Structures are given as C-alpha cells and as structure tokens.
Image (spheres, helix red, strand yellow):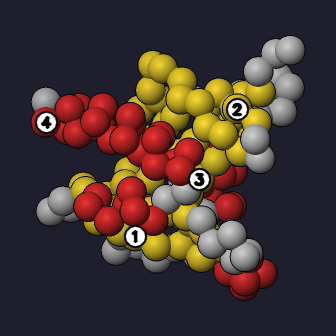
Amino acid sequence: MNPRHGMSVIVYDNNGGLYFLIFRRNTSERKWQFLRKLLQFNEDAHDVIPQLIEKVAGIKTYKLKERLTFEINVVENDEVIQNTVFFVEASMNVPVHMSKEKMRAVTYLWTQESGVADKLSESDRNLFHQAVAHLKARLEQ
C-alpha cells in the first residue's frame, strides 16, 4: 500500500522572538495544530500553499521561506501521512481575516515558541520539535 502524502505549513513571526500561528477546530477534541492538508493524487504542495494560507488561514501577506528537505510523518485518525513541511513567515501585526463561517469552525492563536508544544496535538508536537530545530539553525545563519 502506498503511503498517503500531505503537507504541513508552519507559519511563524520572528519579531523579537519566535511566535507561531496555530489553529484549533472548534470540536470536542480541542487539539491545536499547524495548517495542514491531505494531498490528492497528482496535487502539488507548492500549488496548494496559496489556497491554504490565503483562504483557510486568512493571511494575505506572507513569504514562503523554505520547504524542508525531509518529510515528517504525522498520524491522523490512526493513519500515518508523510508530510512535506513548509515554513511561511507572516506578521502577527497583520490581522488574520477568516470568514465568519470559518471563525465558527476554527480558532487561531499566535503563541510564543515556549508555549507551542504544550498546546499541540501529539503528532503536531513531534512535527514541531523536528522542524523548529531546523528553523532556528537557519535563522542563526
């Protein structure tokens, strides 16, 4: 069986410290996560990023900074999905513009690096620990 492929987008702001944008579906589960999408057959992650950032997250001004050279496995509904991870830089000072119907379904939060891991679902926490080490090394260059 071929593995499923997806993408995760880690939106951050490096303004006097690292801040990350996380999302939570307003369901009984109440788990926070990064933006992610299960890719359909022949769907390219680069083509999906604008839709995910602009339409789902409501961010109009951003910079695609990097695609990680390795994939990170994320478990969702007992299924392992090989995720390509992208870093996107945005400003916390620019409002997130979600539609009213989207705001009823999803909550967002900008949070400092020190508070992110405690809020994330287990699979996103693992993704965060692997990816943030790479991001910090890149920012120190």
Q: Residue at x 34, y 74 (%)?
A: 93
Mark 3 and mark 1: Cα distance apart in space: 13 Å
Mark nearer the N terminus (4 vs 1): 1
Q: Nearer the viewer, residue 2 or 78?
A: 78
Q: Are marks 4 and 3 in contact (CB under 8 Å)?
A: no
Circle 1 packing at 10 Å, graded few (<14), some (14-19), many (20+), is some
Q: Nearer the viewer, mark 2 or mark 3?
A: 2
Local SS, label 4: helix
Crowd around label 2: few <14 · some 14–19 · many ≥20 (10 Å): some
Looking at numbered disc 2 in the image, what kind of residue is underneath it? Val
Q: Report the residue marked by disc 3.
A: 35
Per the model, the C-alpha gap separating discs 2 and 1 is 27 Å
Who comes first in sequence, dot 2 or dot 3? 3
Q: Residue at x 23, y 32 (%)?
A: 138
Q: Tell me the SS state at disc 3.
A: strand
Residue at the far top in the pictured view: 1
Q: Name which residue type carries label 1.
A: Trp
Please name the residue that numbered disc 2 is placed on.
Answer: 80
Residue of label 1 = 110
Query: Circle 4 sits on which residue?
Result: 140
